Image (spheres, grey):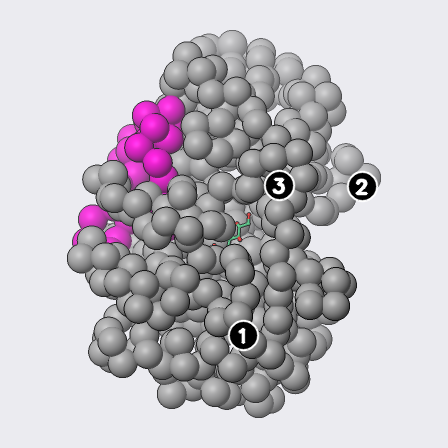
Amino acid sequence: MSATDTIVAVDVVITSPGRNFVTLKITTAEGLVGWGDATLNGRELAVASYLRDHVAPLLVGRDPARIEDTWQYLYRGAYWRRGPVTMTSVGAVDLALWDIKGKATGQPVYQLLGGAVRDRILTYTHASGRDVPRLLDAIDAQRARGFLAVRAQSGVPGLGTVYGVSESGPGPGSGAGPDHARAGQGPAGRGAAPDVEIWDTDAYLRHAPEMLAAARAHVGPELKLLHDVHHRLTPGEAARLGRALEAVNLFWLEDVTPAENQEVLRHVRRHTTVPLAIGEVFNTVWECQTLITEQLIDFVRTCVTHAGGISHLRRIAALAEIWQVRLGPHGPSDISPVAMAASLHVGLSTPNFAIQEYMGYEPVVHEVFRHAWSYEDGYLHPGDEPGLGIEVDEALAARFPYEPAYLPIARRQDGSVSDW
Ligand code: CS2
Ligand code: MG
């Protein structure tokens, strides 16, 4: 890329190979193409419009090499800053520009970020079951694929479908790890309106400790076990659950309580030593600043796309490193292989990066998004292709049109809305 190269085209590719993905494509005058994931599960078209209508016209003519200046331009120049739609849009541009810079220099992005600080990246995947026996079978299936860390979620006696439980269980491996796209929490429920799930915290609190204790007894002491509460408890309930789970020796207990008010985690922290992970719904460092600087969490979960791209995730990592908080970025099937690639380039080059979530994808997704990253024996690696190591088959992508899809809504037994 010469010093005079400029952005000449900015396009948004929406495709739905099993679930909706939004991908940003930036093309330069010298023919370089950069890709960025812009998928926001359940609100895909909002990001597509933000990019097409408000960002693309501003990028044409800009110098693609000025990644940080573009980030500042899009973040501060919007005036209305932060939030998932804005920061996913900024993130997509950031990923695409890092991709271009790597292709221009012939370097994988992790080399541009300072080079590798590890040889491979530990990953965890999901296992779920409507009841404990099915959960244990699902855990065994993931262990058989070499995973060293598994998130365990089960149904709750007396309730119907709840977050995190696949109806059909994990799909067969695609050679690149598991394929959970059929998982209940993988693709957003397709349809013109969200599905409604009934939630009962008391039933969950009665069940979760025995479910996770059974998982630990089944797998033995070494397998890293994780569990996602998914924002559904009050701080007091979270403190009780954390204390009840300490003997299970979880790798982390995730999203124990909604953390818009970061200070409520002080109460949880006072009562339990269970490792806490929060951050997948946060979009900037400011939303997890207190959690990090008061050491209210052990892992920050911000995602490379929804938190403003590689450039901003590195800022979050740098703050977290000062307080010995580690990164465990969000990586479900509703971030695309483009985002997975970017997260792994950050993971290979960031000292306090602990673990990458990886749910896997349907085989067709690997065909639409051809990637250099790979899974092997419980670890991931971004590969050494220039840039992010990703190419999108646009002709194949065009064969999968967008379908309206929403995440479920949870309601309590009294009909009031709960956190899903
Ligand atoms: C979950 C996500 O993987 C996780 O930790 O919290 O699967 C989350 O439910 C989805 O990303 C929502 O789109
Ligand atoms: Mg989660």
Q: Which is more toward the observer, 385 or 250?
A: 250
Tell me the residue that label 1 is attached to.
204
Q: Is residue 363 magenta?
A: yes
Q: Is residue 178 magenta?
A: no
Residue 73, how many percent across, how many down? Answer: 70, 34
Q: Is residue 3 left or right of residue 261?
A: left
Q: Earlier in the sequence, mark 3 or mark 2?
A: 2
Residue found at x 35% / y 70% = 132
Residue at the right extreme?
79
Tell me the residue that label 2 is attached to.
80
Q: Quadrant of the N terminus?
A: top left
Tell me the residue that label 3 is attached to.
406
Q: Kindly identify which numbered label has been placed on residue 240.
A: none
Q: Which is more toward the observer, 273 or 6?
A: 273
Report helix, strand or loop for mark 1: helix
Residue found at x 60% / y 79% = 202
Report helix, strand or loop for mark 3: strand
Whether residue 375 is visible to the viewer of this picture, yes or no, is yes
Q: Earlier in the sequence, mark 2 or mark 1?
A: 2
Residue found at x 51% / y 82% = 206
Q: Is residue 202 above or below residue 272?
A: above
Q: CA distance from mark 1 to mark 3?
A: 24 Å
Residue found at x 26% / y 71% = 223
Q: Are marks 1 and 3 in contact (CB under 8 Å)?
A: no
Q: Is residue 22 above or below residue 394?
A: below
Q: Nearer the viewer, mark 2 or mark 1?
A: 1
Q: Nearer the viewer, mark 3 or mark 2?
A: 3
Q: Is residue 218 left or right of residue 226?
A: left
Question: What type is the residue that disc 3 sits on?
Answer: Tyr
Question: What type is the residue that disc 1 sits on?
Answer: Tyr
Q: CA distance from mark 3 to mark 2?
A: 25 Å
